[in-house]
């Protein structure tokens, strides 16, 4: 695989088992590298282990075995507090269900990672307002999520994912809860952000969404089946 | 994480559940309010009574019999202090004046066409009423058919009693005595100790010719007047010595000792003893009420803990979100501790004014001047915050331990 100098993510022989009475193997000996500035889609049927892979890379969960290194930091060996810091500063999550704080305004939601990263209030607000205008929500800064459409909520979530300027953006079915047109707009926004130099890992079960990436990693039953280069992928 | 932000998140959450939050803090409000009520009331009573005695009565020694020994407020009112005892007491070094006091039975007191039944009529020596207590007129003289009333009594009639007016006292045998009011005294000052704190209307009459409780004096061998209570004015520079000399006489060969029941203790108490006694009673009441308040606060703490546990469950997803964007366990803990502390603070901030209000009402009812207890107020607020924090510890710990993956799947 590619050399480690511009490797943002390195997944090395990772397995994950869940114990629920019986043992469920969600991932089995998965290895994958993401280079800086790349755009990768993980595709596979429901239950194939896509979200599990994304959560392990993002430090939300720890592998049963194997190693995950993000931006030079060994997530799999990190303490709970270190993983919290990695989640806050090295990665930005975008979820299918948006996952915004319901009683915080758009600008406060975008600023939340900065709160935990120790920014002062004035700088938090400045950065969040500028990110919201970058995603086209300059006029919605003080609205709470319930006052926003699905597409607008996902834009707030994307702005939040960008707030600490992370090495990697992890998106789990980001278009799964919005209509086709809105989904297309969100994917267009991803293309712009990718063009601006951000590294993306996107999980989806839909071919047309996966095709927006440079590369598609096909997953089935916790295994990587194949890696496909998308000819004529977006620039 | 910065406290301002956790307070902001918390206030949003409390505002989203106004009713629930309000019900939650009721226990704390009641606990804090009762402490403040009684602290305020106690401080007011103490300030007033202690102030009274300290300003005018520090050099007074009160002599009376008490059946239970250790409780100065439980007194026998048997007339056991004879004229012979009075003379002996007058002879003790340091005693400047001896002022005996007795009760004169009456059926009623009439002024104009208004009759008041069962009024307290107290027989005293003319010297007991001095310029310090008089607000109008003068004291009566021995053998004079005259009375002095306190202000409360003067106001008891629809037309205020004033100096120079006439009163008619109906005696137990039905006979009537017409007397002239020669003076009005302020009931809160003067020599009379505990009986005055009730601020009852009072009529004072000269022992001669109104008081006629007589016994045979064992020492003098003749029948003479005897009194249930005696006040002595002593040299303020020699209170302890004089007090113990008086006590020695009373416990020794006094008529009062011979005339009292064996288990009755004869005591000589100084004004300072009363101050201590009263402070003691107030302290005991305060301790009792504090005990009740602690129970209320424990109930309040359980209420807060319960609601916080519900809140943690309801906000599991929010905990997951916070963790996904970089919150450490202690950040999550802080958010929930701040919420619990804020509930406790709101409870005590509501409890303090409520307690002050009820305390103020109590002082009005007891007719004492209202005094604040600022130390207790500060303490109450601190306790409220502490109750919140303690109640929030376990729920906050539970919140901090929530697994982010499980939390994000929640609902
Ligand atoms: N927290 C968990 N506890 C138990 N089983 C889980 C958990 N997360 C995922 N799984 C199981 O692991 C497998 C992969 O799940 P997931 O990664 O969510 O799949 P996908 O995102 O591809 O739909 C599934 O069988 C799922 O039931
Ligand atoms: Mg999934």
Image (cartoon, coloured by chain):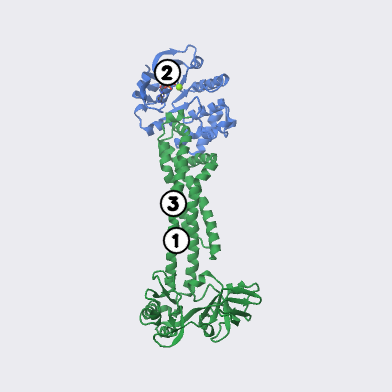
Q: Quadrant of the N terminus of chain B?
A: top left
Residue B358 position in % (x across, y down): 54, 57
Q: Position of residue A39 (x, y in %)?
A: 46, 19
Kindly tell me whether residue B171 is visible in this rendering.
Answer: yes
Return the mark for residue B295. 3
Disc 2 crowd, CA 10 A, few/some/many (<14, 14-19, 20+): many
Q: Colour of chain B?
A: green
Q: Nearer the viewer, mark 2 or mark 1?
A: 1
Let me know if marks 2 and 1 both belong to one chain.
no
Q: Based on the displayed image, in which of its 4 quarters is residue A68 positioned?
A: top left
Q: CA distance from mark 3 to mark 1?
A: 16 Å
Residue at disc 3, secondary structure? helix
Pinpoint the chain carrying mark 1.
B
- Front-lying residue, A115 or B317: B317
Q: Chain ID for label 3?
A: B
- Residue in the picture at 39% in, 74% down: B264
Q: Colour of chain A?
A: blue
Q: Quadrant of ligand 1?
A: top left
Q: In the image, is residue B210 above or below residue B395? A: below
Give how far apart the Cα atoms at labels 2 and 1 are. Answer: 71 Å
Above or below for B406 versus B286:
above
Counting from the top left corner in percent of width and height, residue B226 is at 46, 82
Residue topped by disc 1: B285
Q: Which residue is mark 2?
A: A48
Look at the numbered disc 1 and give the secondary structure of its residue. helix
């Amino acid at each position: 695989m590619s050399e480690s100098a511009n490797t943002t993510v390195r997944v090395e022989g990772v397995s994950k088992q869940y114990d629920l009475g019986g043992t469920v193997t969600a991932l089995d000996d998965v290895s994958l590298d993401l280079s800086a500035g790349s755009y990768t889609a993980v595709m596979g049927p429901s239950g194939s282990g896509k979200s599990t892979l994304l959560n392990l890379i993002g430090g939300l969960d720890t592998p049963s075995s194997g190693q995950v290194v993000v931006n030079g930091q060994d997530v799999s060996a990190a303490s709970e507090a270190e993983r919290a810091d990695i989640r806050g500063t090295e990665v930005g999550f975008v979820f299918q269900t948006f996952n915004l704080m319901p009683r915080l305004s758009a600008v406060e939601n975008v600023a939340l990672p900065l709160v935990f990263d120790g920014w002062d209030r004035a700088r938090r607000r400045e950065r969040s307002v500028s990110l919201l205008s970058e995603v086209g929500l300059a006029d919605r800064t003080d609205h709470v999520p319930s006052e926003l459409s699905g597409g607008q909520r996902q834009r707030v979530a994307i702005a939040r994912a960008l707030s600490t300027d992370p090495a990697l953006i992890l998106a789990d079915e980001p278009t799964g809860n919005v209509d086709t047109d809105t989904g297309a707009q969100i994917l267009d926004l991803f293309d712009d952000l990718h063009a601006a130099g951000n590294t993306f890992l996107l999980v989806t079960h839909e071919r047309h969404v996966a095709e927006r990436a440079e590369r598609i990693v096909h997953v089935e039953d916790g295994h990587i089946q194949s890696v496909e280069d998308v000819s004529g992928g977006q620039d | 994480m910065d406290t301002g932000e956790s307070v902001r998140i918390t206030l949003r959450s409390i505002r989203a559940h106004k009713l629930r939050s309000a019900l939650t803090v009721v226990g704390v409000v009641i606990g804090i309010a009762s402490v403040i009520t009684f602290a305020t009331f106690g401080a007011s009573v103490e300030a007033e009574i202690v102030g009274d005695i300290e300003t005018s009565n520090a050099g007074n020694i009160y002599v009376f019999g008490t059946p239970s020994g250790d409780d100065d407020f439980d007194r026998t009112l048997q007339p056991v202090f004879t004229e012979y005892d009075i003379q002996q007491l007058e002879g003790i070094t340091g005693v400047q004046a001896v002022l005996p006091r007795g009760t004169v039975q009456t059926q009623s007191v009439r002024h104009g066409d208004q009759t008041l039944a069962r009024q307290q009529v107290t027989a005293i020596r003319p010297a007991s009423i001095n310029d310090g207590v008089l607000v109008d007129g003068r004291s009566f003289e021995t053998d004079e058919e005259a009375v002095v009333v306190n202000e409360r009594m003067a106001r008891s009639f629809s037309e205020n009693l004033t100096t120079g007016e006439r009163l008619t006292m109906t005696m137990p045998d039905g006979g009537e005595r017409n007397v002239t009011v020669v003076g009005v005294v302020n009931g809160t000052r003067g020599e009379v100790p505990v009986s005055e704190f009730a601020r009852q209307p009072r009529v004072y009459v000269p022992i001669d010719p109104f008081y006629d409780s007589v016994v045979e004096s064992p020492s003098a061998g003749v029948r003479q007047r005897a009194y249930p209570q005696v006040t002595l004015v002593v040299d303020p520079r020699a209170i302890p010595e004089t007090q113990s000399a008086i006590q020695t006489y009373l416990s020794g060969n006094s008529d009062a000792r011979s005339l009292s029941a064996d288990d009755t203790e004869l005591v000589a108490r100084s004004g300072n003893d009363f101050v201590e006694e009263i402070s003691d009673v107030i302290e005991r009441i305060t301790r009792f009420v504090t005990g009740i308040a602690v129970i209320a606060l424990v109930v309040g703490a359980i209420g807060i803990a319960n609601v916080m546990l519900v809140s943690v469950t309801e906000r599991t997803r929010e905990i997951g979100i916070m963790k996904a964007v970089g919150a450490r366990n202690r950040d999550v803990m802080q958010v929930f501790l701040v919420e619990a502390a804020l509930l406790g603070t709101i409870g005590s901030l509501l409890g303090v004014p409520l307690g002050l209000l009820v305390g103020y009402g109590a002082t009005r009812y007891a007719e004492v001047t209202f005094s604040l207890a600022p130390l207790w107020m500060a303490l109450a607020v601190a306790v409220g915050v502490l109750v919140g924090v303690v109640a929030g510890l376990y729920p906050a710990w539970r919140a901090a331990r929530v697994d982010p993956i499980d939390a994000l799947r929640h609902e």
